[in-house]
Amino acid sequence: MKRKLAVLLLAALLLTTCMAMFCGCVDEEPKPREVELELVNPITGDEIKYGDTIDWPEEKTYIEVRIKDAETGEYLNNFDFPDNSIRGSYYTRFILISDSGIETKQLETEGYWPSLDTIEDYSYFYNEYRINIHFDCKPKHVKDPEYKRKYATCVASVIFYRNK
């Protein structure tokens, strides 16, 4: 009887040890990596930072955003996204800000810089501009609630001025 009990205890101990080792070998689900968003100056190619003054681009110039891995500092490219499109991974909103600093007008620009004529129509009331950027690497066609993002969702906002 003692022998059977000793064998059972040994088997339980062995099983517990094996399970602990097996559970330790399984990788946890990786967290989505953080990113940084940079609004690109369409004239110079440099990053537009908060408070910068820029020359206005030609009409229908695409609002370009660079996406950088916050940990490595490397810029992501089309191959880093499931649908091979960085552009499809973010959207922008162009907003006019009044002299008192209040967001008052959002322009529907469909991802392009508004024309200078459009801006001139509002320049009497507005002297600051803001572009909001929303990034999400999950393709729009993926409806799976269990989808695992490689990169974390991120939102950025840049307020800037224009040379007159």
Image (cartoon, rainbow, N blue to C red):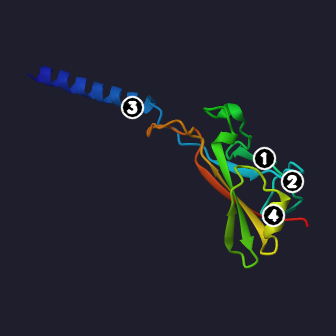
For marks 4 and 2, the one nearer the N-term is 2
Q: Mark 3 points at which residue?
A: 23
In terms of sequence position, does the residue under pointer 1 or pointer 3 come before the other? 3
**Identity, as a three-letter code, of the amino acid under mark 4:** Ile
Q: What element does badge 3 sit on?
A: helix
Residue depicted at x 74% and y 41%: 75
Callout 1 secondary element: loop
Answer left or right for 14 relative to 148.
left
Number of marks in picture:
4
What quarter of the picture does the C terminus occupy?
bottom right
Report, in whole angstroms, how far the alpha carbon at label 4 lies from the one at label 2. Answer: 11 Å
Neighbourhood count class around disc 3 (C-alpha, 10 Å): few under 14, some 14–19, many 20 upward: few
Asked if the residues shown at circle 4 and circle 1 are in contact, with their CB atoms under 8 angstroms apart, the answer is no
Rounded to the nearest angstrom, the CA distance separating label 1 from label 3 is: 49 Å
Q: Circle 2 — which element?
A: loop
Q: How far apart are marks 4 and 1 (CA)?
A: 16 Å
**Residue topped by disc 2:** 57
Q: Position of residue 119 (x, y in %)?
A: 81, 64
Sequence-first tag of 3 and 4? 3
Q: Is residue 143 left or right of residue 91?
A: left
Q: Which of 112 and 148 is in front in this view?
A: 112
Single out the mark in the foreground, 3 or 4: 4
Marks 2/1: CA distance? Answer: 9 Å
Mark 4 closeness class: few <14, some 14–19, many ≥20 residues within 10 Å = some
Which circle, 1 or 3, is nearer the viewer?
1
* Residue ID for mark 4: 119
On residue 62, the disc is 1
